[in-house]
Image (cartoon, rainbow, N blue to C red):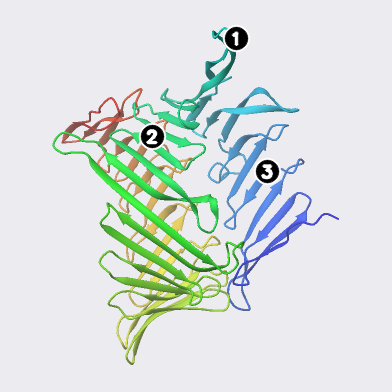
Amino acid sequence: MTKQLSTVTDADGRVTTIVRVDADTVEIHAPPGPGANGESVVTTLDLDANGYLSELTDPRGAKWAFDYAADGLMTKAWDERANEGGVRSGPPSTFTYETFGFDGNHERHYLVQDENALGGSQNLSWPTAPTLTQAPIYKTWCDGSQYIWSWVVTESRATVAWETAQGRTNTVEMVHSRTGPEPTDTSIRTEPSGRVTSSTKGLSSFVHSGTAPGMTWDRELTPDPRFGAESAYPSASSTTVLAAEGRPALTRTVVRGETAILTEPLDPLSLAISTSNVTVNGTRTWNESYLDATKTFTSESPEGRTSSYKVDAVGRVVQINAPGQVPTQLVYDAEGYLLEVKRTKGAETRSTRYTYDDRGYLGSVTADSSATESLQTLLPQNDPMGFPGEVTVPGISTTLQSVDVAGATSGITPPGKPQHGMTYDVLGQLTEYRPPLHDAGAPAGTCPDGAECYSYSLDRQLEDVTLADGTVVDYSYGTATGLLDSVVVPDFGTVNYGYTTAGRLQ
């Protein structure tokens, strides 16, 4: 009998339940909210005939949809905005692949185009084979002369390039070299702007280095005292900003050390004591430590100021001690919900208290403003994803908020004022901001009087902003580089930008 995951229980005892309604439908029920009447929010997964995810419905009712090729590669994806008028009713993102040989008995496919719902795309080109550099291996004849016995690969290079819908090309070149004291892998990225960054990693050591326009860096990694080389940390690093006109080069060095004492030497989770220290430029040192016996983390600044915080058995912060302040206490219920944050000095205690709705979303915050007064904020209309539709300070003000199908803010109504509205395109880019006095009767597809409207290029760069008075702020970019060339501002003029060959603003 096949066993399938049905529940996940966290450290607080809260249970996520997985319900298989039928062969094609799976529901994920979040942990219920606090108390006996707690409710679960549900995410639904619908599978196709091959068991691939076909549709996903979040607790708010928004849907994602996916199509696949016969071999299981995803070919189309509709996000929540593309599905707002019905599942698969809007434009999808599409993915195109090509076959590059075989991997065992299976075809090997590479993604060659990723096109979004508005036609913007990344078009990728992959190397069919790396470029190899070889060197001869010599042997010696009996008469002392040499002959080429074999050849060895000293370097291999492969380049991946991707071009945007507007013809701007990025490249990444991977170089594997065996010419130095140890093999190295180097990644070199060239952006459309001309900016080049590189990173080199030694394959048998823990030394990394890299370059970027105007700077260099290097770092040495050391195996973590608990988890070893798989979790190495930077024990020494140096970053240099190269000299420029009017100033010398600037260098920052950092040295770090870590120690750990385990109660069971072979169990990295049996931590008893850990320490770490960081020294910057040889003069300023920060120290940190953890003592498991008291569940306390302590840190000390270069000036000698000490702060600490204590956690409980499941890792929740329960006390914070900061220099010059009375301790801060944090109180939780049995399910891990934060109920109160308080400070006590002498006989006086001030606190901030929290309550939650039946689904576990924040329902109210009550903060003491003095020894005898407090200020309460209510959130009585959380949607199924926890977005607060109303924020009320009783007797003072109420602010209303709304979101679109993707969770982006679509309306804000300040206390006693009309609503401000926002509209987004299918990619989530803000296209329209409507203040209260805009022309609500403007034809569809036009920018209403009194509103601000935004348009973007296929590469998702802001191109025009139509202001409330109808004037337009125009942004222009380099055709090949994609860098901002100029901004035309009404009643002001044109602001131009220039760059170095490395893509840096001059």
Which of marks 1 and 2 precedes in the sequence? 1
Residue found at x 17% / y 32%: 493
Give x and y (percent) for residue 5: 73, 58
Task: State the residue position of label 1.
Answer: 142
Which element carries disc 2, helix, strand or loop?
strand
Which element carries disc 3, helix, strand or loop?
strand
Res 413 seen here: yes
Give x and y (percent) for residue 443: 40, 39
Number of residues whose C-alpha sits closer than 10 Å to that of mark 1, classed few (under 14), some (14–19) or many (20 or more): few
Q: CA distance from mark 2 to mark 1?
A: 74 Å
Give x and y (percent) for residue 70: 73, 32
Task: State the residue position of label 3.
Answer: 54
Q: Nearer the viewer, residue 51 or 306?
A: 306
Is 332 situated above or below 56?
below
Pointers 2 and 1 in contact (C-beta within 8 Å): no
- Which residue is farthest front? 143
Which element carries disc 1, helix, strand or loop?
loop
Q: Nearer the viewer, residue 441 or 454?
A: 454
- Looking at the image, is mark 3 or mark 1 nearer the viewer? 1
Give x and y (percent) for residue 11: 60, 69
Q: Which mark is residue 456?
A: 2
Q: CA distance from mark 3 to mark 1?
A: 72 Å
Pointers 3 and 1 in contact (C-beta within 8 Å): no
Q: CA distance from mark 2 to mark 3?
A: 30 Å
Residue type pointed to by label 1:
Cys
Residue type pointed to by label 2:
Tyr
